Image: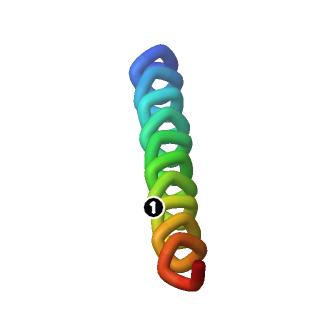
Amino acid sequence: MGTIVLSSEIDLRAGLHTSARKAKDTTGWFTNLITAGSK
């Protein structure tokens, strides 16, 4: 049972990490769009 909890915790952390990276990519994309538009 302990291993199941551990593996699900790892999955959760991986999911959060992926979401954070995706959000950062989206923010960077918007920043690039705004920067390109203001030139």
Q: How far from the left and from the top, in percent, is residue 16?
A: 50, 47
**20, 35: nearer the viewer:** 35
Where residue 26 sits, quadrant-wise, is bottom left
Q: How far from the left and from the top, in percent, is residue 19?
A: 45, 51
Whether residue 38 sits left or right of residue 1 in the image: it is: right
Work out whether 5 lies above or below 26.
Answer: above
- Residue labelled with disc 1: 26
What colouring does the structure picture have? Answer: rainbow
Q: Quadrant of the N terminus?
A: top left
Q: At numbered mark 1, what does the secondary structure look like: helix, strand or loop?
A: helix
Q: How many dots with numbers?
A: 1
**Residue furthest out toward the bottom:** 38
Work out whether 27 lies above or below 39.
Answer: above
Q: Quadrant of the C terminus?
A: bottom right
**38, 3: nearer the viewer:** 38
Where residue 17 sits, quadrant-wise, is top right
Whether residue 21 sits left or right of residue 26 in the image: it is: right
Amino acid type, label 1:
Thr
